[in-house]
Amino acid sequence: MYQKVLIVGHLGADPEMRYLPNGDPVTNFRMATSERWTGQDGQPQERTVWWRVAVFGRQAEVCNQYLAKGRLVLVEGRMDPDPATGGPRVFTRQDGTPGASYELRALNVRFLGSRGEGAAPGPTLREAGGPPVYGEPQGEEDLPF
């Protein structure tokens, strides 16, 4: 079986990096995806889903160095279910309402938007040795026409 999740959203906080016992870097960050629509009553509606994302290896170091709260990113990965339930991690908030935590193991992270959108100053992911960034100008040979 195979699964792939693709989400686009904004970071809810600055990323945090740590190292596994074997020395591999891991960067974690929270990310919000939002959906907006007009309800049947004509009132605007909005739903926000929060994700916890874990990035490993060299990509973890780049994300920790260049991402910041508010930055728009695209994350491609797979969901890590709660081992006890096989679904999202369910919890009770301080106000007594139920909540769920969706966890994603990132396989690929793309920086979207400009560096001014909540991003720390520094090179793009491409300049740091990573894959091309969506929306970033490519060379003329990369143009589709």
Image (tube, grey):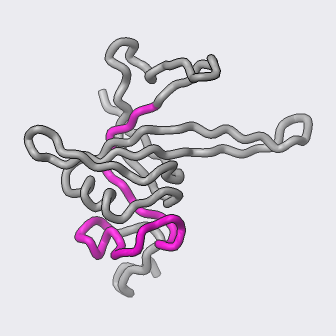
Could you tell me if residue 118 is visible in this image?
A: yes
Report x, y in % for residue 115: 47, 72
Task: Determine the residue located farthest toward the right in the rendered image.
Answer: 41
The residue under the point 72% across, 41% down is 46
Highlighted range, magenta: 102-131
Task: Provide residue 119's location: percent of width, then percent of height.
Answer: 46, 66
Vertical side of 26 occupied by 102: above or below? above
* Image spot of residue 113 (x, y percent): 51, 68
Residue located at (34% from left, 45% from top): 28
> Which residue of the protein is positioned furthest toward the left in this rendering?
22
Q: Quadrant of residue 109?
A: bottom left
Task: Residue 107: tell me if it is visible.
Answer: no
Q: Is 99 drawn above or below residue 118 in the view shown?
A: above
Residue at the image point whose x is 49% and y is 46% from the top:
31
Q: Is residue 91 above or below residue 125?
A: above
- Is 120 part of what is drawn in magenta? yes
The residue shown at (32%, 52%) is 108
Magenta highlight: main SS: loop
Q: Is residue 107 left or right of residue 138?
A: left
